Amino acid sequence: MAGNQLGKTLAGAAEWAMHLTGRYPGWWRGKVFDGPTRLWAAGVTGEGTRDNPQRLLVGPPQQAEARGTGMIPGEAILDTIMGRGAPGALDSVVVRHGGGGDVQAGESVLSFKSYEKGREKWQGETLHGVWFDEEPPLDIYSEGLTRTNATDGITMVTFTPLRGLSEVVLLFLSAEEVQRTGRGEVPPS
């Protein structure tokens, strides 16, 4: 959680690109997957997902020739599958994972989702990670978490808490932070 235009989505895209490609910098201390991954990146609407996570991961959606200029290196993008609904929106991307040093080559799959279609569209899949770009409704957040249970996977949420102390925001705050916030103090980010 942080303010607007501070780089939250950019940071999320950078981490997702590492997990998709298996290219982790030496300084990385977060989760490392030693093989190809299945990940979702999601936003509130199809257009919002296209214009934010997709743009930063793959490149500007309005310029097909710019595909591969995002956080996922162009040479690692093996295939793209177009989505339906929002013009220029992708359904999924197949990404080359590894293939250098001790990392075996394989194919990761990134799929794009939106909250607007409801919780039912989030059921069934087993994933290594779910990235919520913008605050999701609690039922979709819970469903996304469930997708990672079998893989010891990860979830991340990049958002500005525009809804105040919503059910999702409260999941990330300690009792002390909630009490301070109730007195008009802003919790540390």
Image (cartoon, grey):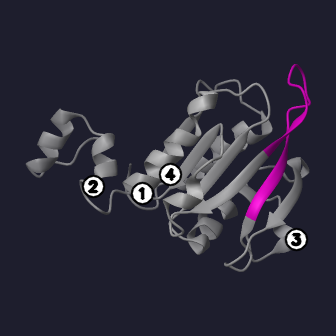
Residue drawn 84% across the image and 72% down it: 64
> Which of the 4 image quadrants contains residue 63?
bottom right
Q: Which mark is residue 65?
A: 3
| Left or right, residue 26 beside residue 53 | right
Give whichever of discs 3 and 2 has the lower sequence position.
3
Tag 1 residue: 135
CA separation in Å, label 1 and label 3: 31 Å
CA separation in Å, label 3 and label 4: 26 Å
Residue drawn 83% across the image and 51% down it: 94
Of badges 4 and 2, the one in the foreground is 2
Give whichever of discs 1 and 2 has the lower sequence position.
1
Q: Quick check: marks 1 and 4 in contact, CB under 8 Å? A: no
Q: Quick check: marks 1 and 2 in contact, CB under 8 Å? A: yes
Q: Which mark is residue 144?
A: none
Q: Quick check: marks 1 and 3 in contact, CB under 8 Å? A: no
CA separation in Å, label 4 and label 2: 19 Å
Write down the region rendered in magenta. 91-108
**Quadrant holding the C terminus:** top left
The verdict on residue 92 being magenta is yes
Q: Amino acid at mark 4?
A: Lys
Question: Does residue 34 show up?
Answer: yes
Tag 2 residue: 166
Q: Position of residue 18 (x, y in %)?
A: 71, 38
| Left or right, residue 3 beside residue 98 | left
Of badges 1 and 4, the one in the foreground is 1
CA separation in Å, label 3 and label 2: 41 Å
Question: Does residue 11 show up?
Answer: no
**Is 183 above or below relative to 97?**
below
Q: Which mark is residue 8?
A: 4
CA separation in Å, label 1 and label 4: 12 Å
